[in-house]
Image (spheres, rainbow, N blue to C red):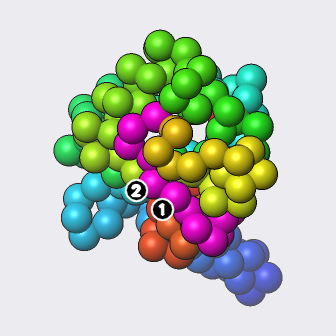
């Protein structure tokens, strides 16, 4: 084997090791032993789908003891969480998620534009005062993985 082939094989091996270590790092859990995930929801027509994904996520990993999930809602999707008009299934799921300790944040900017207060949203919501996208970025900086179904 000539030097060029040896160099190419060595470079390929180093690349494979690097790729494997990056893939492993992406699936390792933090020191708490729990994966952290933030779901981003702004499409009104995806509310049921995203809440179903969150339930499937909890079920798939064995419950909230094995994952920390946050949901950040802004834009048109927030209308689905107005307590006065919320679908009973959505109300039930939000209550269950809240009791599990899941953070459910409403964008403060969207709340202003929809003229709604946190008390008018389903119980369990907190306000993302700086905005929904800012809250998502804050969570990502804390090691949360970002999902936007």
Q: Is residue 54 visible?
A: yes
Magenta highlight on residue 22: no
Q: Mark 1: give few (<14), some (14-19) or many (20+) Cα within 10 Å.
A: many
Look at mark 1 in the image and give the residue it sits on.
144
Q: Is residue 39 above or below residue 76?
A: below
Look at mark 2 in the image and give the residue it sits on.
36
Asked which secondary structure carries label 2, the reply is strand
Expressed as whole percent of the image width and height from the top left, the position of residue 113 reads 77, 51
Q: Quadrant of residue 43?
A: top right
Q: Is residue 104 visible?
A: no
Expressed as whole percent of the image width and height from the top left, the position of residue 124 reads 38, 43
Q: Are marks 2 and 1 in contact (CB under 8 Å)?
A: yes
Q: Residue at x 25, y 37 (%)?
A: 99
Q: Is residue 96 above or below residue 14?
A: above
Q: Mark 2: give few (<14), some (14-19) or many (20+) Cα within 10 Å.
A: many
Q: Provide the residue span drawn in magenta.
A: 122-135
Describe residue 101's horizontal placement relative to residue 133 as left or right: left
Q: Residue at x 47, y 14 (%)?
A: 89
Residue 38 vs residue 116, the one in the foreground: 116
Q: Quadrant of residue 126?
A: bottom left
Asked which secondary structure carries label 1, the reply is loop
Q: Residue at x 63, y 60 (%)?
A: 108
Q: Residues under labels 2 and 1: Cα distance?
A: 5 Å
Expressed as whole percent of the image width and height from the top left, the position of residue 14 reads 59, 76
Describe residue 40's horizontal placement relative to residue 2 as left or right: left
Q: Residue at x 56, y 62 (%)?
A: 128
Residue 25 vs residue 2, the one in the foreground: 25
Residue at the extreme top = 88
Looking at the rendered image, the quarter that the N terminus falls into is bottom right
Residue 104 vs residue 79, the one in the foreground: 79
Q: How many marks?
A: 2
Looking at the rendered image, the quarter that the C terminus falls into is top right
């Amino acid at each position: 084997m000539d030097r060029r082939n040896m160099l190419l094989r060595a470079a390929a091996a180093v690349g494979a090791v690097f790729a494997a270590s990056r893939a492993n790092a992406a699936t390792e859990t933090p020191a708490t032993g729990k994966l952290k995930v933030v779901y981003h929801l702004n499409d009104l027509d995806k509310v049921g789908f995203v809440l179903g994904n969150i339930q499937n996520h909890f079920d798939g990993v064995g419950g909230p003891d094995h994952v920390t999930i946050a949901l950040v809602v802004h834009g048109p999707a927030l209308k689905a969480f107005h307590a006065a008009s919320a679908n009973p299934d959505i109300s039930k799921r939000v209550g269950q998620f809240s009791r599990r300790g899941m953070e459910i944040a409403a964008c403060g900017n969207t709340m202003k534009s929809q003229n709604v207060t946190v008390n008018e949203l389903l119980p369990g919501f907190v306000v993302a005062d700086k905005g929904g996208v800012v809250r998502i970025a804050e969570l990502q900086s804390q090691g949360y993985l970002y999902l936007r179904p």
